[in-house]
Image: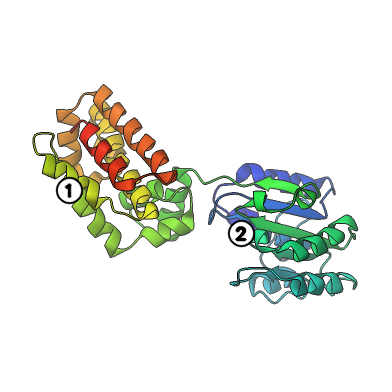
Amino acid sequence: MSFANIYGHQKQIGMLQKAMAQERVGHSYLFSGPDAIGKKTLAMAFTQALNCENAAERYDSCGNCSSCRKMIHRNHPDIHVLETQAQFIRIDAIRNIQEQMTFKPLEGRRRVFIIDDADKMNEQSANALLKTLEEPSADNIIMLVTARPYWLPQTILSRCRHVRVNPLAVETVAQFLIEQQQMDASKALLLASLSGGSIGQAIELDSEDMIAYRTELSRLLSTASLRNPMSLLALASFLGQDKKEIKQGLKLLNTYFRDALVYKETAQASMIINSDDLPVIASLACRLNGEQILQNITLVEKSNETIEMNVNKSLTLEAMAFNLHL
Ligand SMILES: [Zn+2]
């Protein structure tokens, strides 16, 4: 993967390329940010660029040279990715890295160790790694990747250059889905807006289940009314019990209110996320004024935050349903 093929993360890429241009690449990096938003991809692209035979001036990898090809096929002898399904990264794995660091790189200019989920290091492993970070060697670079940097000891954090990776913009995720997954624009926008800025999450959401879920939510939303309390309870209970599921449902719900607002202001179906569900959007836009829709959006967002705090989920959702303008 070259930098040029990465969607988004322009600021971070610029920072890494600048370090290459100024020949001030660090010995240890920490890529942090929420799960599945491209931290490791960024670290891999940086690694490939650092070892590419044609990276001079462009500060990006070519994808064709011998080093790039080995990197792409994951058999570059100087590039090591440490990943584990286990609960901890054990000290043996760190000792193994230390041992390899005593030799010169075999082929590449830099030997790179990428430690994914670095927060899985137990205390012993972290202490061992700290020793390595304290005695940097010119040929070796260590890149830590983590969604939970606060679980790493301060002593390690302070020795790394931080690359803070943010969730992608909705438009960027949608662009990826359209260009790389040949998805039509409205579906891409819907999945992107539910993805939390993660391409991986958007792809995972692209399933029959998701479509069926939205169809049912749409039906409940169009029939919910204060005059019929059962309809509100049905909406609340449909949003579920599981925290992750609820948060997904609330995001989806808010795409309807967001759409209603956009439709009210522009009357254009093309700007709408749920454009294939236009009658429901148009009906909301017709029944509610702009202020009411905005209040709904705020209420759903607040409920989403409350759910995060492990409160009584059913009560939160019911209170929300009874306070929505519908
Ligand atoms: Zn190359």
Give the SS element for disc 1: helix
**Residue 170: which quarter of the image?**
top left
Image location (x, y in percent) of residue 150: 66, 48
Instruction: Write down the residue under mark 2.
Output: 41
What is the x, y in percent for residue 124? Answer: 77, 65
User: In which of the image's four quarters is ligand 1 placed?
Assistant: bottom right
Amino acid type, residue under disc 1 in the picture: Ala
User: Quick check: can you spot residue 45?
Assistant: no
| Label ID, residue 234 | 1
Within the image, what quadrant is residue 320 found in? top left
Q: Is residue 318 left or right of residue 64?
A: left
**Marks 2 and 1 in Cβ contact (< 8 Å):** no
Asked whether 195 or 271 is in front, the reply is 195
Q: At label 2, which amino acid type do we have?
A: Thr
Instruction: Tell me: residue 111, above or below residue 170.
Output: below
At x 72% / y 61%, what residue is drawn?
47
